Amino acid sequence: KAGVTQTPRYLIKTRGQQVTLSCSPISGHRSVSWYQQTPGQGLQFLFEYFSETQRNKGNFPGRFSGRQFSNSRSEMNVSTLELGDSALYLCASQPEGFEGYTFGSGTRLTVV
Amino acid sequence: TQLLEQSPQFLSIQEGENLTVYCNSSSVFSSLQWYRQEPGEGPVLLVTVVTGGEVKKLKRLTFQFGDARKDSSLHITAAQPGDTGLYLCAGGGPYNFNKFYFGSGTKLNVKP
């Protein structure tokens, strides 16, 4: 069965631009979560979507947003990019009632 | 401040040695997960423990959840170069069952 797919794998953007990252969860998983991973801060929770609704949110500014579609695919958007947004962005899905993620390979975003 | 503190941060050992990684918190968790992450990839779930005092074994890896569900340990027997990677613990809850808090990780290098 296919795993969690994230696209693109790598992205280079300029400060001030915006970016959209995509995630396709494992079939049947309705919960999709997004994390930011940096060497200094580790994995930081961005938000979680379940059945097209944002169910949980981390402590990130409003420039970070997301959405989920009826087929459970999810996108996250970062507007007005800053140098500090350079990170590995990870998407993870899990079935309801199970505590444990299946992660995608991530999108490496570099802001220059 | 991290909700989960992992120690040690770095570990470099020879093949065949034993090691233990610790994950501690002052908070109670509904579950504790361990992941291994290799460079350029997303974390891979190794185990989820949910009952205080629970011990789970996965080949040469032994995971323990503290009686009070505030801490956990991962013990590797006879480490092999294939065990090299970043080991992350993650706690489910205590305030929200669909949001997980990650430790900062232990970077393990096993030399042949």
Image (cartoon, rainbow, N blue to C red):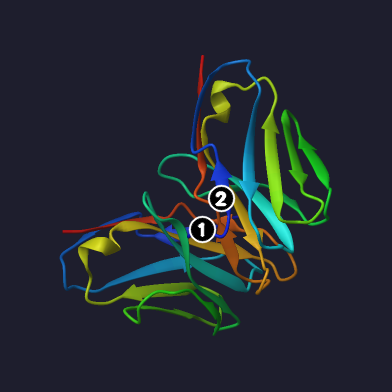
> Circle 2: is it few (<14), some (14-19), or many (20+) Cα within 10 Å?
some
Q: Position of residue B95 (x, y in %)?
A: 66, 74
Relative height, residue A26 to residue A64 (above, below)? above
Calculate the distance from the C-alpha at mark 2 to the C-alpha at mark 1: 6 Å
Q: What percent of the width, then of the height, locates residue B25?
A: 63, 55
Chain designation of label 1: B
Question: Under tag 2, what secondary structure?
Answer: strand
Query: Image height check: is B9 above or below B15?
Result: below
Q: For the point 55% across and 65% down, which residue is it?
A: A25
| Disc 1 crowd, CA 10 A, few/some/many (<14, 14-19, 20+) | few
Q: Residue furthest bottom?
A: A53
Residue at 62% over, 22% down: B79
The answer to which quarter of the image holds residue B81 is top right
Q: Nearer the viewer, residue B98 or B21?
A: B21
Left or right of residue A2: residue A19: left
Secondary element under disc 1, as helix, strand or loop, is loop
**Figure check: B8 above or below B44:** above
* Residue at (63% x, 74% y) in the render: A30
Can you give x and y, in whole percent of width and height, for residue B60 in the image? 72, 28
How many badges with numbers are in the image? 2
| Tag 2: amino acid | Glu
Q: Is residue A1 visible?
A: no
Residue situated in front as seen by the camera: B45 or A43: A43
Instruction: Quickly name the residue at label 2.
Output: B5
Q: Quadrant of residue A84?
A: bottom left
Q: Are marks 2 and 1 on the same chain?
A: yes
Marks 2 and 1 close (CB-CB < 8 Å): yes
Label placed on residue B2: 1
- Above or below, B17 against B49 in this view is above
Callout 1, which amino acid? Answer: Gln
Question: Where residue B90 sits: x, y (%)?
Answer: 61, 55
